[in-house]
Amino acid sequence: MPELPEVETTRRGLAPHVEGQRITGVLLRRPDLRWPIPPEVSERLPGQRVSAVRRRAKYLLFDTPAGSAVLHLGMSGVLRVLPATTAVGAHDHVDMGLEDGRVLRFTDPRRFGCLLWQAPGTVHALLAKLGPEPLSEDFSGETLYTASRGKTASIKTFLMDQAVVVGVGNIYAAEALFEAGIRPTAPAGSVSRARYAALADAVKRILGHAIERGGTTLRDFLNPDGLPGYFEQELLVYGREGEACRVCGTKLRGKRVGQRASVWCPSCQK
DNA sequence: CATCGGACCTGTTAGC
DNA sequence: TGCTAACAGGTCCGAT
């Protein structure tokens, strides 16, 4: 389930194979994923040369002079560069032909992903309201502290709000809160500046480390080389409700916070 | 405005 | 063992 490290891993795996190549054609096996695929994707993309594969939040952007294809992996999306002769599976929704003869294939069983279009010099509406990148200097404890004043929602919900900071999903939110020693249920507006500094540090450290390790593989994520990530075995709280805290041995608690399964250590997190 | 709940989708897993 | 129901996850949108 791609969070930011998985998307960045995908980008890094894809870029050397796709950048500089011309898109020879676009084959849509479905007219829509989460949203209808706009006509520009099939009308304008063919013939264009990809100048860069970028990432913003969990979106991948394939830049060309005519505009950018904007792709979100949703929860089960996989992008791979494959030989054109590779057998087509049930959930292989989009193929973009590359001039070297291979195809960039978008597979997404649950179809929570999307493929959109962004005209040159514009920012797609879905990208316009996003918060800072967590690994950039625009994101800090101060950012979180300032944005959280007056908020009554839980800090976990707050941290997963893509307008606050992008790329932190359920897995890394749980891990970052554990590392910072903050309970997921704490009201965001009540958390101190010092604790937000620790949380921002934890987010940066965990995301950075996960990217180094190739992303977390749970069920659905495969990086473009078809190899799983190696971060899963390092998770300290996510998915471990009822098990012993790896730090202090206390039984980990679990409960839904803001509609999301959440796990924390009652002893390490206050 | 902030927050909450519903919707989307399907493979996997837990429970009967 | 087989079937069904719940669940997972990201994010938008309408309702409160």
Image (spheres, coloured by chain):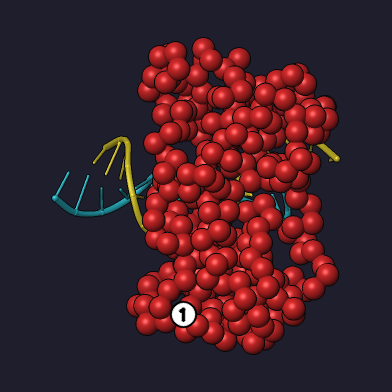
Chain colours: A red, B yellow, C cyan
A4 vs A35: above or below: above
Point 70% across, 76% down: residue: A64
Image x and y of residue A49, in percent: 65, 80
- Judge from the rendering whether residue A199 lies leftward or rightward of residue A143; answer left or right: left
- Judge from the rendering whether residue A8 lies leftward or rightward of residue A165; answer left or right: left
Image x and y of residue A160, in percent: 65, 39
Image x and y of residue A142, in percent: 80, 29
Q: Give whichever of A189, B1 is nearer the camera.
A: A189
A168 vs A81: above or below: above
A185 vs A157: above or below: above
The reply to whether residue A154 is in sight is no
Point 76% across, 64% down: residue: A124
Q: Give whichever of A112, A3 is nearer the camera.
A: A3
- Judge from the rendering whether residue A204 lies leftward or rightward of residue B11; answer left or right: right
Image quarter in which the C terminus of chain A is found: top right
Q: Toward which corner of the image does residue A174 lie, by quadrant? A: top right
Point 54% across, 39% down: residue: A209
Residue type beneath disc 1: Arg
The reply to whether residue A13 is in sight is yes
Image x and y of residue C4, in percent: 32, 50
Point 65% across, 58% down: residue: A55
Can you identify the residue that label 1 sits on?
Answer: A102
Please tell me how crowded label 1 is: few (under 14), some (14-19), or many (20+) other residues with Cα within 10 Å: some
Q: Which element carries disc 1, helix, strand or loop?
A: strand
